Image (cartoon, rainbow, N blue to C red):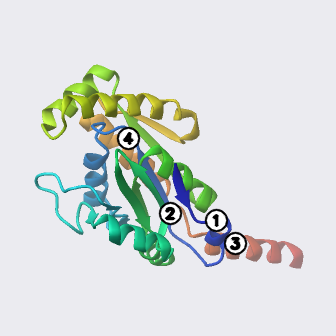
Amino acid sequence: MTNSMPASQATQGALFGRILILSGPSGSGKSTLCKILQEHFSDIYFSISTTTRAPRDGERDGVDYHFVSQEQFIADIKQGAFLEWAQVHNNYYGTALLPITLALEQGKLVIFDVDVQGHQSIKEYYGNLARSVFITTRSKEILRKRLESRQTDSTQNIELRLLHAYNEMQQLSHFDYLIVNDDLQSSKRAIIGIATSLEFIPQPSIYQSLWQDVGEDMKQ
């Protein structure tokens, strides 16, 4: 179960940025597509999740995740520091609210890499400001091979992740876009296209232009 702040709190400030949520099973390629977006867009803010799980080989604190102890995570929960948080595979994961708010106020494209539960919480909190993409493979066997190639999970954990992936697939209808990540180049074009489509004129400018047009019409 994911815990999140009340959705009404998102409307208390002026948020002019855009939000793109990437979600999907472990091994679907979310992290790779996130890195592609970071390389392609200059005004991007990648939301770095906080977790209590141990770092994998090559992962860096503050770059891939904010790695904290369970005690610290629980303390942050009590202080209301998270937009959303959940317990997944016996570890805690959460999204810090303050840096996201600052990035949106600066008009940046904010990218989330979260599970299905986190996706639901973020969509509820930000409403139409957020768009979401579900990333998956064409079959369970492709996903299994990717998880096995990591050599970071036991057979039991892989089976648990595959079961979790099946459950996540049942939530496809709640997403705005779907990418079947079997070919990286095709997926790269798709994710860049989706993110580019979010680069609209900031809403205050749209409203200002609209009322200017109405004013001119009224003068005639």
Q: Are marks 1 and 3 in contact (CB under 8 Å)?
A: no
Q: Which residue is mark 3?
A: 207
Front position among marks 4 and 3 = 4
Give amino acid for label 4: Ala
Nearest to the observer: residue 31 or residue 140: 140
State the separation of the CA atoms marked 1 and 3.
27 Å
Q: Tell me if residue 29 comes above or below residue 67 in the rendering.
A: above
Question: Of label 2 and label 3, which has the lower sequence position?
Answer: 2
Mark 2 vs mark 1, foreground winner is 1
Task: From the top left corner, tell me how far across and down residue 219 is, in percent.
Answer: 87, 79
Tell me the residue that label 4 is attached to: 190
* Sequence-earlier tag: 1 or 3: 1
Q: CA distance from mark 2 to mark 3?
A: 17 Å
Residue in view at x 26 percent, y 34 percent: 157
Graded by Cα atoms within 10 Å as few (under 14), some (14 to 19) or many (20 or more), the crowding at tag 1 reads few
Q: Which residue is more in the foreground, 68 or 100?
A: 68
Q: Indicate which disc, 4 or 2, sits on the residue closer to the N terminus.
A: 2
